[in-house]
Amino acid sequence: MRLEILLATYNSEKYLTELLDSLRAQSYTNWELLVHDDGSTDQTITILKEFRKQHGIAIKILISDRQLGPMRSFEKLMEYSSADYLMFCDHDDIWLPHKIEESLACLQQLEKRNPDQAALVFSDLEVVDEQLNTIHSSFWNYSKVNPDNVYNCYKLLINNPAPGCTFIMNKKVKPLVLPFPEQARMHDWWIILKVAESGVIHYLKKPGLLYRQHKKNEVGAEGIKNTYFLSRLTNLSLTIKRNMESYRMMKCLSNKYSLLKLLWYKLRISLAKLF
């Protein structure tokens, strides 16, 4: 049985060593690291090679001849991987020591109950600032997003409770989700939507990692405040853009989904965030 951690890097030198140290501190140690670097011009590659040499950890580094961006970097990593189990990893997070062991145990139990199915497990996250001070102990509570959204594709199209850095998946997920369509808003959202439709999902209620928030986050945690609707109105173009992206992703999934039903769920979920 092989488990690979898939890591996308781009000018990641600032936080990379802290992440790698947290991987080395895992209670489950039988894993390999597969990295796609998107053209870093800093010390990212040097840090990875030195870490591999110093600690004897299996690290494979893929480099493209052009920049792919986060979604296509993870697509390339999934295509290249031949492991039985896959986990995604972000360069600026810190994995808690139990993350791999507990996630893998949960996934294997899910597989026993659902043999021959594409299976995915995710977890909560602890939201922290750039210096790792706790902002909130639960990403789900902080963002007012329900992890049970994964059992209703309409809700999941509106609010994804599962960032990819919390995933562990079996290899049956690969043929289900690849290649990522142009309509996919992000790789992790597309993956969990496809597994929600055609596979099985479970989640761990405890955080598996420290989810670092800083100015260069591609995607981050958004705290829900009393100004939630005001912020949406003042950024109306962005709100419309996101809704259109969700609609296009919905139509790419299947024609069975209704735009009116999606908008109904959108209204319900938006109102629920206020209370």
Image: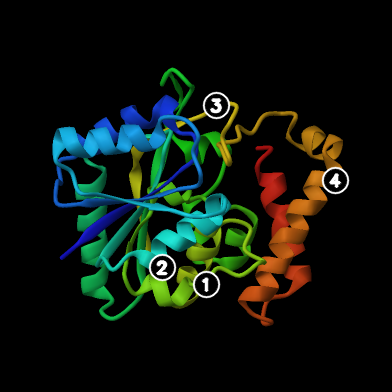
Q: Which residue of the protein is positioned furthest toward the front in this rendering?
A: 65
> In the rendered structure, which amino acid carries the disc numbered 3?
His
The answer to the question of whether label 1 and label 2 lie on touching residues, with beta carbons closer than 8 A, is yes
Q: Would you say 127 lies left or right of 261 here?
A: left
Q: In the image, is residue 224 above or below residue 238?
A: above
Cα separation, mark 3 vs mark 2, equals: 30 Å
Cα separation, mark 4 vs mark 1, equals: 29 Å
> In the rendered structure, which amino acid carries the disc numbered 4?
Ser
Cα separation, mark 4 vs mark 3, equals: 24 Å
Question: Where is residue 120, by image quadrant?
Answer: bottom left
Q: Provide the residue designation for mark 4.
A: 237
Question: Where is residue 167, by image quadrant?
Answer: bottom left
Q: Would you say 46 lies left or right of 227 here?
A: left
Determine the secondary structure under disc 4.
helix
Q: Provide the residue designation for mark 1.
A: 179
Q: Residue at x 41, y 68 (%)?
A: 79
Cα separation, mark 3 vs mark 1, equals: 30 Å
> In the rendered structure, which amino acid carries the disc numbered 1?
Pro
Give whichever of discs 3 and 2 has the lower sequence position. 2
Q: Badge 4: few (under 14), some or many (20 or more) residues near its Cα, within 10 Å?
A: few
Where residue 80 sits in the image (x, y, percent)?
37, 65
Q: Provide the residue designation for mark 3.
A: 214
Determine the secondary structure under disc 1.
loop
Q: Provide the residue designation for mark 2.
A: 79
* Render colour scheme: rainbow
Where residue 30 sits in the image (x, y, percent)?
14, 51
Where residue 182 sits in the image (x, y, percent)?
65, 67
Residue 145 visible to an observer of this rendering = yes
Give whichever of discs 1 and 2 has the lower sequence position. 2
Near-viewer residue (38 or 235)? 38
